[in-house]
C-alpha cells in the first residue's frame, strides 16, 4: 500500500507541473475548450496507467506531450467535425517543439498574461471571441463589419505583438 501511495505522490507532483502545458498544447491542436478538457482527462488517465513505464530522469513534460499528441490525433482522425487548421506534419513539428525542455514555461506564461493586459481592448476582445469563446472567424467578421481576411490579418498582427512582447518580458525577467 505504501508503494502505491508513493507512486501517487510522485505522479501527481510531476503531473501538476505539466498539466497547464498539456492543456495549452491540446488547445493549440484542437481549438476547442471542451474537447481539450476532455482529452486532458483522457491524457491524465493514460499517463497514470502507463506511469510504471516512465523512467526517472526522463523529461516528464515530453512524455506527457507525446501522450497528449497521440490522443489529439486520434480524436481529430475520428471526429470529422473537428477541422485541422494545418497539416499533420505541421502539428508534429509543433508538438516536437512543445515536448522539448520548457524551463522557461512559467516565465513565458507570466509574460503572456502581462502582454495580454497591455493589448488594446478591441484586440483582447478579438482574441477572446476567437479563442476563448471559439467563435468562427466568419461570424466575427460579420459582428465587426469586416471580411474574414481582415480578421485573420488582425489576429496575425496581434500574435506578432504578443510574440515580441513575450520575448522582451522574459528577457527583462532574466536580467
Image: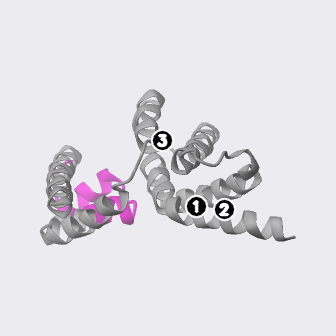
Image quadrant holding the N terminus, namely bottom right
Q: Residues within 10 Å of mark 1 (few under 14, many from 20)?
A: some
Check if residue 8 falls in the magenta segment: no
Q: Nearer the viewer, mark 3 or mark 1?
A: 1
Total numbered badges shown on the rendered structure: 3
Q: Residue 154: x and y, percent?
A: 16, 51
Residue on which disc 3 sits:
83
In the image, residue 125 lies at what x, y percent? 23, 68
Q: Which mark is residue 14?
A: 1
Mark 3: which secondary structure? loop
* Main SS category, magenta section: helix
What is the crowding at mark 3: few (fewer than 14 residues within 10 Å), some, or many (at least 20)?
few
- Asked where in the image residue 10 lies, by quadrant, the reply is bottom right
| Tag 1 near tag 2, CB within 8 Å | yes
Residue 116 placement (x, y as % from top left): 22, 67
Instruction: Report whether residue 135 is seen.
Output: no
Nearer-the-camera pick, 131 or 21: 21
In this rendering, which labeled residue sits more in front, label 2 or label 3?
2
Residue 137 covered by magenta stretch: yes
Quadrant position of residue 71: top right
Q: Residue 11's mark?
A: 2
Residue stretch in magenta: 127-147
Which residue does the image show at 54% across and 62% down from the upper left?
A: 34
- At 56% from the left and 57% from the top, the residue drawn is 35
Q: CA distance from mark 3 to mark 1?
A: 32 Å
Where is the C terminus found, in terms of image quarters? bottom left
Q: Can you see residue 107? A: yes
Amino acid at each position: 500500500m505504501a508503494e502505491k501511495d508513493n507512486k501517487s505522490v510522485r505522479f501527481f507532483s510531476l503531473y501538476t507541473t505539466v498539466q497547464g502545458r498539456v492543456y495549452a498544447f491540446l488547445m493549440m491542436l484542437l481549438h476547442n475548450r471542451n474537447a481539450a478538457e476532455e482529452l486532458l482527462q483522457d491524457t491524465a488517465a493514460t499517463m497514470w496507467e502507463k506511469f510504471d513505464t516512465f523512467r526517472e530522469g526522463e523529461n516528464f513534460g515530453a512524455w506527457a506531450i507525446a501522450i497528449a499528441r497521440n490522443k489529439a490525433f486520434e480524436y481529430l482522425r475520428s471526429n470529422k467535425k473537428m477541422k485541422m487548421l494545418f497539416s499533420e506534419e505541421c502539428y508534429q513539428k509543433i508538438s516536437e517543439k512543445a515536448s522539448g525542455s520548457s524551463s522557461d514555461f512559467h516565465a513565458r506564461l507570466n509574460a503572456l498574461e502581462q502582454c495580454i493586459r497591455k493589448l488594446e481592448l478591441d484586440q483582447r476582445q478579438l482574441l477572446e471571441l476567437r479563442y476563448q469563446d471559439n467563435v468562427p472567424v466568419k461570424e466575427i467578421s460579420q459582428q465587426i463589419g469586416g471580411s474574414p481576411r481582415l480578421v485573420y490579418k488582425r489576429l496575425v498582427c496581434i500574435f506578432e505583438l504578443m510574440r515580441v512582447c513575450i520575448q522582451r518580458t522574459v528577457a527583462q525577467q532574466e536580467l
